[in-house]
Image: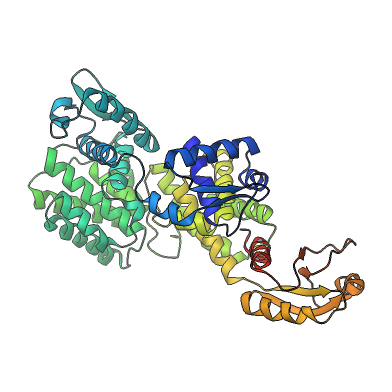
């Protein structure tokens, strides 16, 4: 929780162009002011340099240059690399144990370092509900087979950073020669041809990783833990979707021929669940019950509409229903679908993503679903973000100065050149502004004024200097972004 809040603060400040007070940060992140100050102090301490600067009366600002340099090289690199390598080795053989001395002999580290590694490894594995266990002579990773596979896909293949299968080739070659990479690509191509549709991102990445990980675990250890559920599921799947079942069975047979070892029959179940939860087309199969996905799509739209104070079109609901239909299948089958765009989504649509994550938690409880991950919430965020961008509108603004002329012309020119999303619909004086807001044929969204406006006019007001300084431009940018995009 502490680490997540630190990341939230860094992401939040990374979006700001000027100083932000601790009060505003606290409100936007829904925490106390004291918590914000404490965590900023901790962040600067962790980075070893003031990555977040502060000025009395102005608040906090992220030092972007230091942040970019430090974010690519944080912590004890050798320790991090060692722990990652050990995790990979343990995951491939999990849930079997390895002798501690055999794993660590190539690192030449002390017992104190091994004890420290245990803490780091345990923290890294928490994401997948896995445990790092060390006895007197052995170490192992313990957890469900599904969670083990999800962790392998994320840690070993870095799927949370990949949107293109071709980029995975380098990672795969680091594990084995390129033959397995190209073999797996051929299986994806076979599935696409058999289904008569391309399997696109992120489903192609996920399916590729599942097949490749299975291949390498069998190749290295001639062992993979069996499916936890009964094989009766296999029979149900066979009759539920015989076309997909036959494709999965053929791929498992191809793997057997490729490496000279027959995987357990339960592997067809795993593969079936990955392929059946992939969104192959934009049409939900007519033989599926869409009522639940329809209700959940409606619930998302209602919650996000309330949070953002805007209406979303029926087109969004139709697109969401299809996506959610397959998301439900993934949740119920515990299929891991990494989102390589998550960091960009969190950065570009911070508040929107937070609203959707909050909605996801509520929906999980309301519909008795497994937890909807941040990765899945990120995919849903893209649907809302697309509509917002498509429906992007301009703000109608009035310029107000003492006489309605003079400096207002300079301000009008600067704003028109800097903010294409702001439409200057007129210039007026302080005394006339109330009538314009109330009786204008054009809806006025924003007032930009060089003098304080005392009367209540029901429209956001931005007080700027007569020559519109850079600080004024930042203020207008923040307010316009909040009004248009909820940022």
Hey, which residue is sitting farthest front in the picture? 56
In terms of depth relative to the viewer, which is nearer, 252 or 213? 213
Indicate the colouring scheme.
rainbow
Indicate the quadrant containing the C terminus: top left, top right, bottom left or bottom right: bottom right
In terms of depth relative to the viewer, which is nearer, 366 or 151? 151
Which residue is at a point 24% across and 52% down the rendered structure image?
A: 248
The percent position of residue 407, horizontal first and vertical second, equals 78, 79
The percent position of residue 204, horizontal first and vertical second, equals 31, 59
Residue 223 seen in render: yes
Q: Quadrant of residue 133?
A: top left
Which residue is at a point 44% across and 52% down the rendered structure image?
A: 67
Q: Quadrant of residue 139?
A: top left
Asked if 418 appears above or below 40 in the picture, the reply is below
Asked if 419 appears above or below 337 in the picture, the reply is below
Q: Quadrant of residue 479?
A: bottom right
Asked if 23 appears above or below 461 in the picture, the reply is above
Residue 370 seen in render: no
How many numbered marks are there? 0
Hey, which residue is sitting farthest top in the picture? 136
The percent position of residue 330, horizontal first and vertical second, equals 40, 47
The percent position of residue 182, horizontal first and vertical second, equals 16, 61
In terms of depth relative to the viewer, which is nearer, 454 or 50? 50
In the image: residue 453, left or right of residue 172? right
């Amino acid at each position: 929780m502490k680490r997540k809040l630190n990341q939230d603060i860094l992401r939040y400040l990374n979006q700001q162009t000027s100083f932000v007070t601790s009060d505003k940060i606290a409100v936007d992140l829904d925490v106390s002011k004291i918590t914000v100050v404490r965590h900023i102090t901790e962040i600067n301490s962790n980075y070893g340099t003031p990555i977040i600067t502060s000025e009395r009366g102005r608040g906090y600002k992220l030092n972007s240059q230091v942040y970019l340099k430090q974010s690519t090289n944080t912590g004890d690199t050798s320790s991090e690399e060692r722990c990652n390598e050990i995790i990979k080795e343990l995951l491939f053989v999990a849930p079997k144990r390895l002798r501690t001395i055999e794993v660590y002999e190539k690192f030449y580290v002390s017992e104190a370092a091994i004890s420290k590694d245990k803490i780091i490894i345990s923290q890294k594995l928490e994401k997948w509900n896995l445990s790092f266990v060390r006895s007197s002579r052995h170490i192992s990773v313990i957890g469900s087979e599904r969670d083990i596979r999800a962790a392998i896909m994320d840690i070993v293949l870095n799927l949370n950073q990949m949107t293109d299968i071709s980029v995975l080739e380098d990672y795969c070659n680091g594990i084995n020669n390129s033959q397995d990479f190209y073999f797996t690509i051929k299986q994806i191509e076979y599935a696409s041809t058999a289904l008569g549709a391309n399997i696109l991102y992120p489903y192609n990445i996920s399916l590729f990783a599942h097949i490749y990980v299975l291949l390498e675990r069998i190749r290295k250890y001639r062992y993979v833990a069996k499916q936890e559920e009964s094989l009766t599921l296999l029979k149900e799947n066979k009759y539920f979707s015989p076309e997909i079942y036959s494709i999965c069975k053929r791929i498992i047979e191809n793997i057997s021929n490729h490496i000279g070892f027959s995987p357990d029959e339960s592997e067809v179940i795993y593969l079936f669940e990955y392929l059946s939860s992939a969104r192959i087309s934009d049409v939900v199969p007519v033989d599926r019950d869409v009522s639940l996905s329809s209700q959940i799509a409606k619930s998302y739209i209602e919650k996000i509409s309330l949070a953002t104070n805007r209406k979303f079109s029926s087109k969004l609901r139709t697109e969401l229903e299809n996506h959610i239909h397959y998301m439900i299948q993934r949740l119920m089958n515990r299929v891991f679908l990494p989102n390589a765009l998550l960091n960009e989504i969190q950065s570009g649509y911070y508040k929107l993503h937070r609203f959707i994550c909050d909605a996801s938690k509520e929906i999980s409880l309301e519909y008795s679903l497994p937890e909807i991950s941040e990765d899945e919430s990120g995919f849903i965020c893209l649907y809302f973000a697309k509509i917002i961008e498509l429906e992007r509108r301009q703000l109608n603004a009035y310029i107000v100065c003492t006489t309605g002329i003079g400096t207002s012309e300079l301000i009008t020119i600067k704003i028109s050149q800097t903010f294409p999303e702001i439409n200057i619909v007129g210039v007026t004086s302080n005394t006339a502004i109330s009538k314009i807001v109330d009786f204008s044929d054009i809806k006025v969204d924003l007032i930009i004024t060089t003098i304080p406006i005392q009367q209540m006019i029901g429209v956001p007001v931005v007080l700027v200097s007569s020559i519109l300084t850079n600080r004024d431009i930042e203020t207008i940018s923040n307010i316009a972004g909040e009004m248009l995009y909820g940022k």
